[in-house]
Image: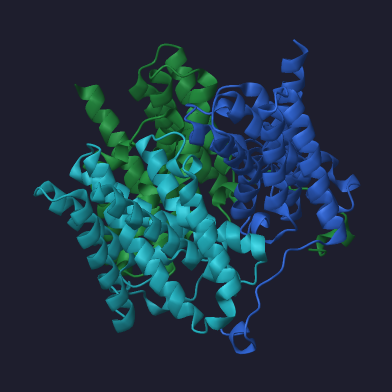
Chain colours: A cyan, B green, C blue
Amino acid sequence: MIGTVVYEILQFAGILAFAISGALVGVRRRLDLLGVIVVGTFTGVGGGVIRDLVLGVHPPVSFVYWPNLAVAVGGSLAVFFMHPGITRIRYFEVVFDAFGLGLFSANGAAVAFASGESPLTAILVGTITAIGGGVIRDVLVNTVPGVLTRELYAVSALTGAGLSVLLMACGGHVILGSLVGGAVAIALRLVSVSRGWHLPKPRIAREEEHRD
Amino acid sequence: MIGTVVYEILQFAGILAFAISGALVGVRRRLDLLGVIVVGTFTGVGGGVIRDLVLGVHPPVSFVYWPNLAVAVGGSLAVFFMHPGITRIRYFEVVFDAFGLGLFSANGAAVAFASGESPLTAILVGTITAIGGGVIRDVLVNTVPGVLTRELYAVSALTGAGLSVLLMACGGHVILGSLVGGAVAIALRLVSVSRGWHLPKPRIAREEEHRD
Amino acid sequence: MIGTVVYEILQFAGILAFAISGALVGVRRRLDLLGVIVVGTFTGVGGGVIRDLVLGVHPPVSFVYWPNLAVAVGGSLAVFFMHPGITRIRYFEVVFDAFGLGLFSANGAAVAFASGESPLTAILVGTITAIGGGVIRDVLVNTVPGVLTRELYAVSALTGAGLSVLLMACGGHVILGSLVGGAVAIALRLVSVSRGWHLPKPRIAREEEHRD
């Protein structure tokens, strides 16, 4: 069935995008080959593992289904060896991270909704799937996760997950939800980066700012 | 039934206290509106999600029951917008964190014990529920979790959880355990902060101290 | 039965080794008594808790079976009080960490395989059990986990888990798999440290190296 094939491709695309973003961070941190593979793989499959733990899928799919791992390891290897040709590292990190974020948010929400969870639960599961991989990557390399600091990061994931569930609640197919929700989330995230869109920051009395 | 209402209120109070402590940390780190909401919400509901994963509740309650999220997001928003009026930030962080710690330790243990777990398991579940939110908050903003460094932090959680289970094992109601255990844990933690109580530190031969 | 006794001893040895490695890090970071116990205990039982969450064992064994906790707390206490006599701290950390890594990788894989998981799943579960405790320890004390940076760390865990499953698939007993796999993993890790074996690092164009 073509639906299943498209669905698989979207899953792999999300894993690949996050694995590449993780491996790029690993390369920038000068990890060795294995370190790059570990951070890339954890980033690629980490969100899905969190999703499965939340939904009670034991063992998580990526512990059972080898193609997920193969895609994540393959993406990490590709980054490691092709790296010297990639010059604008930070830019690529952001783009691949955005693709992973968008694909996982819409897809995770669609999967949860299709398996009978309520819209609220489905949206939250999609969001946690999308930001989980990035949080694992950033915590591993010891930086504050992008979800706390980057432009409209969590908003993009919520939007993708919400749109995906909305389309399915209106009778749309899981593929439609994944594709449209994912595309909007990716677009929203990339536009917010290129425009430097930020939400307001807290006002802090001047004397406090340097207390910490 | 009045018991259920009191129980709900204690749950919400714990979520609110931790969410506020997380949002205060987010404000101090100058995160934007969403970053503050994300760190506040993760801190508020994080301990309970860990508890549910440990006990095998799928999906965790906070993924299903929207009032939990509403309380966490509401507390984070309140901190963000009311913040300029709060001058002694670190002090508030400690107080709200102590309330979250005490309420969750006693409540988490009481819930686990009431659902048939052994006293040991119930105490451990309560303790992990109480310290889980704080660990998530501190790891997200990239500092060493307070449970490793703060005055009697883990001791307060263990005491609250243990007292709660003890009262219930003696026939007390789950509300009694939650209230008394929680109050003692909060008091112990706050007194230990104000008195600067610390457990002994390891003696280290002088030549080693600066080796790292 | 002698098999069960040997199996228990291997389990405890792994928990003890990781607890000591965690407590040594806590002592070096000058945590107080409780901080040392917390980081030692989380490191000792953390990998097994992750394994149980992945396999769907609720609550995880270490929340139910007090000897696991007793071994972890006992090891942490021993490090705290006997510490001044231990002079070459970093060396001991590495050795105990290697023993934990080897014992858990082979043992975790053997347990998973014996309980009916596929070879792939068993190897992945063993590997995540082995590196999980160390990742928890390193994230708690706010450093980049050794699995990303240390010599053949993940390779040693994979080798131990793979060898253990291979022996069992050929008809070997779970004890045989645990012992041989564990011994090879420990040896591989320690030799890689003493020889300074590293996998290749990525080549980075000079102008990029200092961009971050």
Residue A28 percent location from the top left of the image = 58, 74
Check the image and report above or below for B83 versus C62.
below
**Residue C168, quarter of picture:** top right
Query: Can residue C55 be seen?
Result: yes
The quadrant where residue A116 appears? top left
The residue at the point 30 percent across, 41 percent down is: B62
Q: Percent x, y for residue A152?
A: 30, 69
Q: B129 or A126, which lies in front? A: A126
Residue reaching furthest to the bottom: C207
Where B164 sits versus A212, above or below?
above
| Between C129 and C116, the one nearer to me in the picture | C116
Residue most extreme to the left: A170
In x, y percent, where is residue C161? 67, 39
Viewer-side residue, C178 vs C61? C178
| Residue A10 appears left or right of B163 | left
Indicate the quadrant where residue C120 lies.
top right
Residue placed at 65% from the left, 72% from the top?
A30
* Residue at 37 percent of width and 76 percent of height: A205
- In this rendering, does residue B200 appear at all? no
Q: How many marks?
A: 0
User: Which residue sits at x=42%, y=64%?
Assistant: A17
- A10 vs C106, left or right, is left
Whether residue A18 is situated above or below residue B1 in the rendered picture: below
Q: Position of residue B35 (x, y in %)?
A: 36, 64
Relative to A183, is A75 on the left or the right? right
- Looking at the image, which residue sits at the far front? A1
